[in-house]
């Protein structure tokens, strides 16, 4: 297939080179470029904002937004007269005799539309359309909300992922949400003067944040728990009227990612145990009695790299764990030899992949592994990949339609999947406002080797009944239910306890 990439020759970025390299790696693809000036691009004054953010946030100078000379496209010939497909990044191709894929953000083409949405605090809906028909779509996200350059680069990376996915027939749609989606024309691009003012305000805000963070840990996560009394959040679809009790910490650490398991009549809660002075987490566990925790979490798994999301389950009379270890580039399986400790590594399920919050479920005669993958850079939370296996030990095979979903509002797992009658329900993270900001409950309507579809039925936010600033994970076992979210803890208290 001959593919021509339409881009603005007046503003060639590292993103374009990366996208061309990824396209060139596909089988039976011949590439060319159309580099005519497009007009209406990002004003040059935006470079001042990008430079300032690079300095005050310590960002790389070699990210995807970096301007590169036109000569960087020399390996690719100029567009042939009749390519099989034009991928239009500018929104100005009007050839009816040739297939054209138009890339848009909330309906508008070009990177100026994307940046305008970012500056307005919007969650861009990226679409690839051919003759008005959606070929692929995704809600783009970032873990760097409020930093325009980092957000811009994350979303450029995911735009590349979406284009590659469209060529393989993946990421065809995103689920509707139970609250109004952000839609319509993007806000206008700020003027040069307004961008300068914004840059100055960004500096002032960052100075205040730096001072604030000298006195506070941000975020400081906490775990909430309650007895369900037979009705959990999957039933209530709202916070319980009784509210939540908190798992106490000593201020020098926080607990997050609660995973309970009822094993041999004893309820045990596993958590991410993040130690502030070390800057990394281990896995700890605490037993629960009828009235709550029996003591404080004690370490059960400590490795040289950061661990979190201790996905524990029982199978074949033993307890297994798949903790998140994306810092190591692996997804590993452990077995308890002296429960709740004595963990030994049994297998590496996936290697060479930055996979977050791996979640396993048995469905349709096979095992499935859900995880978000940092595909080609970009956000950690918006790109869902699946793998299948005949047994939870593997071997695991990637889904032929990966990524099956690009959606910052519902891609990343948020706990175990549960069954309600014939329904398979999946907790998901809604990261549109920020990482782990809200919790969604999605019903999986289709899952096989053809694809995965889900319907987001409920979104739960923090509120009066959960004082955390975020709502991030949901799990239950043994009549108890657990959530987590972030709060703010004074740093001086941490030092007093160290």
Image (tube, rainbow, N blue to C red):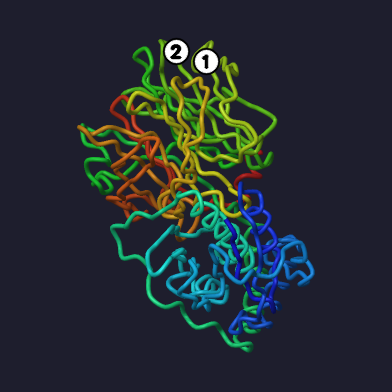
Q: Which residue is mark 2?
A: 318
**Viewer can see residue 210:** no
Res 363 quadrant in image: top left
Disc 1 target residue? 336
- Res 230 label: none
- Residue 91 in percent (x, y) is at 52, 75
Q: Does the image show residue 136?
A: yes
In this view, the residue in front, 291 or 485, is: 485
Secondary element at image label 2: strand
Secondary structure beneath disc 1? strand
- Mark 1, Cα crowd under 10 Å, few <14 / some 14-19 / many 20+, is some
The answer to whether the residue labelled 2 contacts the one labelled 1, judged by CB atoms less than 8 Å apart, is: yes
Q: Could you tell me which residue is drawn at 61 percent across and 84 percent down?
A: 39
The residue that appears at 30% across and 45% down in the rendered structure is: 243
Q: Earlier in the sequence, mark 2 or mark 1?
A: 2
Relative to 468, say whether 352 is above or below.
above
Viewer-nearest residue: 29 or 302: 29
In the image, residue 351 above or below residue 178: above
87 w.r.t. 421: above or below: below
Find residue 1 and report its horizontal and vertical position in percent. 57, 55
Quarter holding the C terminus is top right
Relative height, residue 202 to residue 134 (above, below): below
Bin the neighbour count of mark 2 within 10 Å (Cα to Cα): few under 14, some 14-19, many 20 and up: few
Q: How many marks?
A: 2
65 displayed left or right of 374: right
Percent x, y of residue 227: 28, 33
Find residue 260 and report its horizontal and vertical position in percent: 40, 28
Residue 176 figure quarter: bottom left
Judge from the rendering whether residue 79 lies leftward or rightward of residue 58; answer left or right.
left
Residue displayed at 45% across by 12% down:
318
């Amino acid at each position: 297939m001959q593919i021509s990439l339409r881009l603005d020759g007046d503003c060639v970025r590292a993103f374009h080179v990366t996208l061309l390299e990824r396209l060139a790696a596909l089988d039976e693809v011949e590439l060319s470029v159309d580099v005519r000036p497009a007009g209406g691009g990002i004003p040059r004054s935006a470079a001042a904002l990008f430079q300032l953010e690079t300095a005050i946030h310590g960002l790389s100078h070699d990210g995807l937004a970096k301007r590169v000379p036109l000569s960087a496209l020399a390996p690719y010939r100029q567009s042939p007269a009749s390519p099989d497909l034009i991928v239009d990044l500018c929104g100005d191709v009007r050839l009816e005799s040739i297939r054209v894929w138009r890339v848009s953000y909330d309906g508008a083409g070009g990177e100026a539309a994307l940046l305008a949405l970012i500056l307005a605090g919007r969650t861009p809906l990226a679409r690839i359309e051919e003759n008005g028909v959606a070929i692929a779509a995704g809600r783009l996200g970032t873990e760097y909300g409020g930093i325009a350059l980092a957000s811009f680069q994350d979303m450029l990376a995911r735009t590349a992922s979406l284009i590659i996915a469209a060529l393989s027939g993946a990421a065809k749609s995103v689920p509707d949400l139970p609250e109004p989606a952000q839609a319509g024309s993007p806000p206008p691009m700020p003027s040069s003067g307004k961008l300068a003012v914004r840059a100055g305000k960004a500096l002032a805000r960052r100075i205040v944040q730096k001072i604030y963070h000298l006195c506070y840990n941000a975020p400081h996560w906490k775990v909430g728990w309650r007895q369900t009394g037979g009705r959990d959040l999957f039933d209530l679809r709202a916070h319980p009227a009784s509210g939540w009790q908190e798992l106490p910490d000593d201020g020098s650490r926080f607990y997050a990612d609660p995973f309970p398991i009822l094993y041999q009549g004893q309820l045990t809660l596993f958590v991410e145990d993040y130690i502030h002075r070390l800057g990394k987490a281990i896995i700890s566990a605490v037993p629960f009695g009828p009235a709550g925790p029996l003591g404080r979490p004690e370490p059960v798994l400590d490795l040289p790299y950061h661990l979190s999301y201790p996905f524990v389950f029982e199978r074949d009379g033993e307890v297994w764990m798949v903790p998140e270890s994306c810092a190591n580039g692996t997804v590993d399986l452990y077995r308890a030899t002296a429960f709740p400790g004595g963990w030994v590594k049994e297998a590496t399920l996936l290697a060479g992949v930055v996979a977050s919050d791996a979640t396993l479920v048995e469905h349709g005669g096979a095992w499935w592994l859900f995880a978000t993958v940092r595909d080609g850079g970009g956000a950690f939370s918006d790109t869902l990949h699946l793998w299948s296996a005949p047994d939870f030990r593997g071997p695991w095979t990637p889904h032929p339609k990966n990524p099956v979903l690009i959606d910052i509002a519902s891609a990343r797992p948020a706990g175990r999947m549960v069954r309600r009658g014939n329904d398979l329900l999946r907790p998901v993270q809604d990261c549109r406002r920020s990482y782990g900001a809200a919790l969604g409950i999605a019903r999986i309507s289709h899952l096989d080797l053809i694809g995965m579809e889900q319907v987001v039925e409920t979104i739960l936010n923090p509120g009066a009944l959960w004082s955390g600033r975020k709502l991030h994970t949901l799990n239950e076992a043994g009549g108890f239910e657990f959530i987590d979210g972030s709060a703010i803890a004074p740093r001086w208290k941490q030092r007093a306890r160290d």
